[in-house]
Image: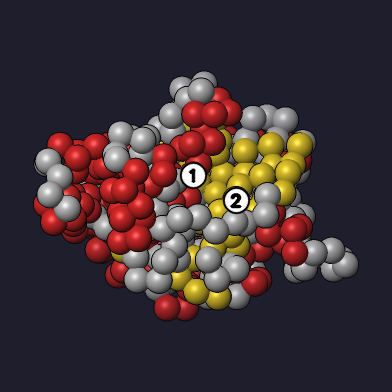
Amino acid sequence: MTAETTAPNATAGDDAGAVPLLGLEPDDLERRIGSFMEEAGEPSFRTEQVVNWVYDQCALDFDEITTLPTELRAEAGRRFSLTAVEPAYTARSEDGTIKHLWQLEDGEQVESVLIPTEDRLTLCVSSQAGCALGCRFCATGHFGFNRHLSTEEITAQFRNAQRAARREYDREITNVVFMGMGEPMANRDNVFPALTVLNRGFGIGARRITVSTVGLVPGIRALTERPENFGLAVSLHAPNHDLRQEIMRIEKRFPIPELMEAIREYQAETGRRVTFEYLLIDGLNDSEELADQLADLCADLDCFVNLIPFNPIPAVEWEPTPDDRVAAFARRLHRNGVSAAVRQPRGRDIAAACGQLRLEQSGEGEDAE
Ligand code: SAH
Ligand code: SF4
């Protein structure tokens, strides 16, 4: 592993009152840049130049838009802002995974992770600083909730990570998943416009953008109503009410039957395969009987189960399920006709599981057992 720390520095365009361009839906952005150019007496092709620099070149500030006259760049930098996140820390795993810790303007820090495979380059983004839902296995949950991320703080993670992807791998991001810190469905006001920006602005196909939720039913319904058919992943982690409510508080508010109903509606409307995330925790949720219960839940759905070996966190004493029993759990699902795979942990050497880099950097987890 290699790592470096970069001190956050101010960039032109951060003036109070400047309109954050990455927070606007693409049509709105074009309209506003259009009227700015018109007021400045500039030809309309200038608008296209800026739109291209924002989304295709992933500009960090107006000084990079060298096709614009210097004066115009300075004026645009006063009216609009492009900077919302600064790199605070970068960690590179031996397996190619790159994790960024981003510093926001008020000092909050959130993570994103770039995960390269042969045919994909997936970016995992954060949607909140912390999380209010308090799932017992989750490092972010143990921090509690600090605040929602704004739309531009979400899309700027993409913009910055895309620049890193081009530089470090000479590749483009192909997929985006909302599986970093926070619960995206608890921050729909900012996450839903960010989906539009990623899709129509940065050009990531809706089929390649997946929202992962702990199971907030109104959020699943709202995603179903979007015409684009974005992907849905649901963190299930237990197949029955008693066990699930022991490890995830959300089960009390939206119990499994109601959750499954919303998932079925999503599937009927979008025709898309749903992903279930299922952590395997030693002796807790990994018996073959529970695999059968999980298979029963999957019976009338087109779904895929992602089995994830639990990554230990200081706050609980749980251990990951040993490999042979992970394999047995997967076999049991297969025998029941359920598609499932064990997700290879990526970036273990750089603490790439949810919330864990921030935990290391802040020292918050250092002296806990
Ligand atoms: N709030 C959303 C998205 C962020 S959490 C959700 O819960 O789906 C995304 C994923 O992080 C969870 O599904 C879980 O699979 C993973 N995760 C959380 N804590 C983990 C841990 N200790 N070890 C391994 N994966 C973990
Ligand atoms: Fe929040 Fe997801 Fe972690 Fe649960 S697993 S605490 S919903 S981030």
Figure check: 115 above or below 264: above
CB of residue at label 2: within 8 Å of ligand 1? no
* Residue to which mark 2 is pinned: 87
Give the residue displayed 38% in from the left and 47% down from the top: 62
Give the residue displayed 44% in from the left and 62% down from the top: 14
Residue 365 in the figure: left or right of residue 227: right
The percent coordinates of residue 115 (x first, y second) are 55, 36
The percent coordinates of residue 38 (x first, y second) are 11, 52
CB of residue at label 1: within 8 Å of ligand 1? no
Question: Which tag, 2 or 1, sits closer to the chain's start?
Answer: 2
Give the residue displayed 45% in from the left and 55% down from the top: 12
Q: Quadrant of the C terminus?
A: bottom right
Residue farthest toward the front in the current orientation of the protein: 71
- Amino acid bearing label 2: Pro
Sort mark 2 into few (<14), some (14-19) or many (20+) by Cα contacts within 10 Å.
many
Q: Give yes or no for contact between labels 2 and 1 (Cβ–Cβ under 8 Å).
A: yes
Give the SS element for disc 2.
strand
Residue 73 in the figure: left or right of residue 212: left
Disc ID at residue 122: none
Q: Quadrant of the N terminus?
A: top right
Instruction: State the image quarter where residue 152 is shown.
Output: bottom left
Disc ID at residue 160: 1
C-alpha separation, residue under disc 2 versus residue under disc 1: 9 Å
